[in-house]
Image (cartoon, rainbow, N blue to C red):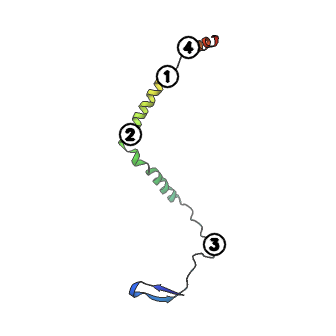
């Protein structure tokens, strides 16, 4: 079999063996992850969400959300009927 070596004018044909893409030997085992490799992956994972968390717009939305949740919790506490009033209402409902 001939193989072209080079390109254009410098191309020349040489004989050689062609190695199959499928080797007959066993597949190569992946290397075990080193501690340094794990530390690098951890660093990348921790650094990825940092830029969006530094956004002023996000900070404003979070603050408004916390204030809103606090207001809703306060409203829920204020509108909850007292147990004695609830018991009196249930008693009246059952008698009618």
Quadrant in the rendering for residue 88: top right
Cα–Cα gap, marks 2 and 4: 42 Å
> Are discs 3 and 2 less than 8 Å apart at CB?
no
The local secondary structure at tag 1 comes to helix
Residue 83 percent across, percent down from the top left: 57, 16
Residue 50 percent across, percent down from the top left: 41, 48
Residue found 37% across the figure and 44% down from its top: 55
Cα–Cα gap, marks 4 and 3: 79 Å
> Are discs 2 and 4 less than 8 Å apart at CB?
no
Q: Which part of the image, by quadrant, shows the C terminus?
A: top right
> Are discs 4 and 3 less than 8 Å apart at CB?
no
First in sequence, mark 4 or 3: give its number.
3
Check disc 4 and report the residue beneath it. 85
Residue lying farthest to the front in this orientation:
96
The local secondary structure at tag 2 comes to helix
Check disc 1 and report the residue beneath it. 77
Check disc 2 and report the residue beneath it. 59
């Amino acid at each position: 079999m001939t193989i072209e070596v080079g390109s254009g004018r410098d191309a020349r044909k040489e004989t050689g063996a062609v190695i199959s893409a499928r080797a007959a030997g066993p597949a190569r085992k992946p290397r075990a992850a080193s501690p340094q490799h794990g530390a690098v992956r951890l660093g990348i994972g921790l650094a990825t969400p940092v830029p969006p968390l530094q956004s002023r717009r996000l900070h404003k939305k979070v603050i408004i959300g916390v204030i809103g949740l606090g207001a809703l919790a306060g409203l829920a506490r204020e509108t909850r009927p007292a147990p004695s009033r609830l018991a009196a209402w249930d008693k009246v409902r059952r008698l009618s």
